[in-house]
Amino acid sequence: MSAQFRDQVRRYRQDDLAGWGPKVWGEMSGELWRSRELMWRLFVRDFIAKYKQSILGVSWAVIMPLMVVGVFVFLNRSGILNVGETGVPYPLYALIGLTVWQVFSGGLTACSGAIVAGGSMVSKVNFPKEALVVAAFGQVIIETLVRVVLLAIAFAMYQVSPSWTVVLVPFVLLPMLFLTLGLGLLFSLLNVLTRDVGNILTLGTTFLMFMTPVVYPAPAEGLFADITVYNPLAPLVGAARDMVLTGHLKQPVMYAWASGLSGVFLLFSWRLFHMVEPRMAERL
Amino acid sequence: MSSGEIAVQARGVSKKFSRSLGRSIWYGIQDVSRNLIGLQTRSQTLRPDEFWAVEDVSFDLHRGEIMGLIGPNGSGKSTTLKMLNGIFMPDVGEIEIRGKVGALIDVGVGFHPMLTGRENIYVSGAVHGMTRRQIDGLLDEIIAFSEVEAFIDTPVKYYSSGMYVRLGFSVAIHLNPDVLLIDEVLSVGDMAFSRKCFQKIEAVLNSGITVIFVSHAIRHVERICQKAVLLHKGKVEAYGEASDVTKQYYALANNLSTLDTKSGDMNLGQHSAPERFKVLGVEILNEERKISDQHYMMSQMVIRVRFEAYEKMKDLNTFVRLYSIDGINIVSISSIGNGCSEWIGPGTCDCVIPELLLREGVYTVGISLSDQTFSLFRAERAAEFSVIPDESVFHRAGSSGGMMHIPASWQFHSEEQN
């Protein structure tokens, strides 16, 4: 024990957290690695707590997308909304898009509330707060898996078989997870300062969903096509859908850009989170 | 023991807070922005609306030492403890801690009401930095200590508050750290469990780990700690041997309390019939009948109550209660049997204590008066006085410790004589 005693030295000093040097990154990675068990525990805790109190349980995860898809199918059939050529039956197309989209929107909502939900824990015990955010994100992964089952049933019903590249979807989705986690880390801190964040996010993600080709294909030209070019979410959602349906990326260059951007953004917001975290404890 | 390795070192540690929420957010954004571009924050200087909550605190703690952190409310004890725990970053200075740190600052951390006791043990343990294997090994011990075996697979939502706290405490005390930080969390459960907690804490304290102990229970600090730091308004007022520091705390508490009793001690009292009877003042006098709030053990002390009766009172009696600084009622005495059968007009009642048997400390005097049928006046903090430590007095009296003295005669007999 004595050797271990000497090994573990903690030093707390202002501005030790400053900057971008390799030392800081080493410390952050070490902390993240050591908190893997804590993340798992918090994830299991939230999971049990969530479904013990609910009669419909995990089926909530599919009720929402089914309703949204229902509305869009209705709008499409009645000719109010013309989505153009989708290649597969429209409900299937919309369901794929929504399933991918909800990784982003659900993840953002869950992550952004994580620190506030942590409450007194955050101000009373020293532990890596990232664990709270990651654990919250874990809930969304579970919901997504449930939605994937729904999607599989839908495929069977329409007797459409997905491209073999569907197995690549988890990898193609990684940049989107990075982007979600990055935004989630930032918003979880902002949420401590002002509880308006929750409302802003609900509004924002709904708005973004219509601004992003989620339930309709990306338009080829016009104002909307121009906007879509600057929307990193568009290629990220599109790429996942391409992998399910055709196996060919429609926008490989944009996808690459968006992926790089998401990765860098996650690193930036993780760094910022780590820097701001002790200041947030003072405000909870 | 003090020759050992240094376990905790604080060097010129300061922490500032902002009085205004808006400004604190703005300052926070400034500081973070500077850090983001790799600059140092301007943390050494105060900006408008900021104040030092803790200022220039330094101490060394060797392995196996136990240090008390004492001081009046708002003196910066909890902030210091949170900095030691790494929850807050010091603005100035630095803290170095060697070994695994455990914090007994709150109980039931991470508990979720819907989870069973057993599940929550794992969650709370993980939050405190324990691994699954460690918790597996300690599980039986944790459950046994908490005394909630029968309900361990019931959601903690259905626990009584006592059971909840007991389970939380049990997890926290089984952390086995090298350095343990304890805030006063010991209002735990019923009396029997509370005693068990103290015993467990003392066992942990004696197991050779390094401990920093924040407490208002000065006698505990005196008894358990080797070292102590006295904080007052964020600054170190005294640092060193626990017994020396606690003496300074008594002196400080005495200065503080006279200030605040002068500002209207009688307001704290309640008259039930002010038109019939009024207490005008409570004074504490020394042997020379001079008002004094400092007394020696074994000296004469008089508690004088000045009052006025506007009607004829029958069976007027005075009750005096003495409380220690931590609110324990040490003695209650009354004039019953020596009261006055009839009274009208102004007067005084002297409670003469021929030999003050209390040891050093600050004491509060509670006063009540009543007549035959009614309670006329009641004040729990009518006055305060301090007993000044004087080793020669203690020695002469044969008092070697504790809160008070009891005169005793001592007889040594040899076996043959009987």
Image (spheres, coloured by chain):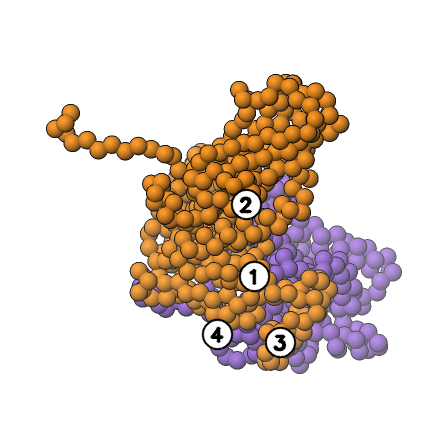
Chain colours: A purple, B orange
User: Residue B408's x, y, as percent?
Assistant: 33, 33
Residue that mark 4 sits on: A26
Q: Looking at the rendered structure, which numbered label has been put on residue B42?
A: 3
Q: Does residue B339 appear in this view?
A: yes
Along the polypeptide, which appears first: circle 1 or circle 3? 3
Residue designated by label 2: B293
Residue B265 x, y percent position in the rendering:
65, 42
Foreground tag (1 vs 4): 1
What chain does badge 3 belong to? B
Q: Residue at x 80, y 78 (%)?
A: A226
- Place residue B364 in its image quadrant: top right
* Numbered disc in front, either 1 or 2: 2
Q: Residue at x 79, y 73 (%)?
A: A219
- Cβ–Cβ under 8 Å for marks 1 and 2: no
| Image location of residue B45, percent across then percent down | 62, 74
For disc 1, the marked residue is: B234
**What amino acid is found at the position of numbered circle 2 in the picture?**
Asp
Q: Amino acid at mark 1?
A: Gly
Q: Compared to A258, does A134 lie above or below?
A: above
The reply to whether label 1 and label 4 mark residues of one chain is no
Instruction: Name the residue nearer the viewer: A122 or A220.
Output: A122
